[in-house]
Amino acid sequence: MQAEPMAQLKPELFHGDLPDHRVEQYLKKSMIAIDTETRGLIIPRDRLCLIQLCDDEGVVSLVRYENAAAAPNLRRLLIDQNVTKLFHYARFDVAVMKHWLGEWTGPIWCTKIASKLVRTYTDRHSLKELCREQLGREMDKADQTSDWAKEDLTESQMEYAANDVRYLHALQRQMKALLEREGRLHIAEKMFAFLPTVCELDLMGFSNMFEH
Ligand code: MN
């Protein structure tokens, strides 16, 4: 099923933090999609480079990370209890932001956890796969492993970064409907609530705490 093409707003790039007008706009929303780009997958080693955010109207902000102190607006949004932060694989992004931006207390929703709970007919739970199956959209992941610390991001990198948050709201609606249909929304919500603890354990170096 091909989804209706959304009118796509150009992503805006900001340095260090979200501007005041943009954080005020996001704080009025009940859910904001977030993704991060880092220099690699080892959190204390590979620094945070970019934070992408998108609201339900497709307003995309790309924030170049400088340091936690330079990002009061971003931190205010992250800890806000009324704005659910939506991710695909929240375990990584939440740990990244916990490490590079400070404490984490806000509510979380994760489309990858939702997918694992309802799409038990497959082991493919990437954002690319979900977008293809659920939204009929092909994602170009060519820039996934590019250098996000470069001074000037290319147009192609900016579009790639924006696409990682642009489809999350539509996916979340579909995943939530499937969780409800399968009677698994309650367990998903319990997992979302527990995620900050998992991230904290990851950052402390504990893994597989539930294994024998
Ligand atoms: Mn990404």
Image: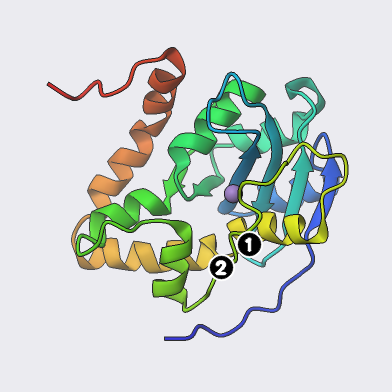
Q: Is residue 188 left or right of residue 131?
A: left
Classify 174 as above or below 64.
below
Residue labelled with disc 1: 163
Residue shown at 64% from the left, 41% from the top = 37
Classify 171 as above or below 53.
below
Mark 1 and mark 2 in contact (Cβ < 8 Å)?
A: yes
- Find residue 139 and name its label: 2
Q: Residues within 10 Å of mark 1 (few under 14, many from 20)?
A: many
Q: Position of residue 179 (x, y in %)?
A: 27, 61
Q: Position of residue 191 (x, y in %)?
A: 31, 39
Mark 2 to mark 1 CA distance (whole Å): 8 Å
Q: Which picture quadrant has residue 98?
A: top right
Which element type, helix, strand or loop, lies under badge 1? helix
Q: Is residue 183 left or right of residue 173?
A: left
- Total labels: the figure holds 2
Q: Amino acid at mark 1?
A: Asn
Q: Is residue 172 left or right of residue 44?
A: left
Q: Position of residue 185 (x, y in %)?
A: 27, 54
Q: Quick one: 79 or 65, which is closer to the camera?
A: 65
Q: Residues within 10 Å of mark 2 (few under 14, many from 20)?
A: some
Which element type, helix, strand or loop, lies under badge 2? loop
Q: Quick one: 66 or 122, which is closer to the camera?
A: 122
State yes or no: Cβ of the residue under disc 1 lies below 8 Å from any atom of ligand 1: no
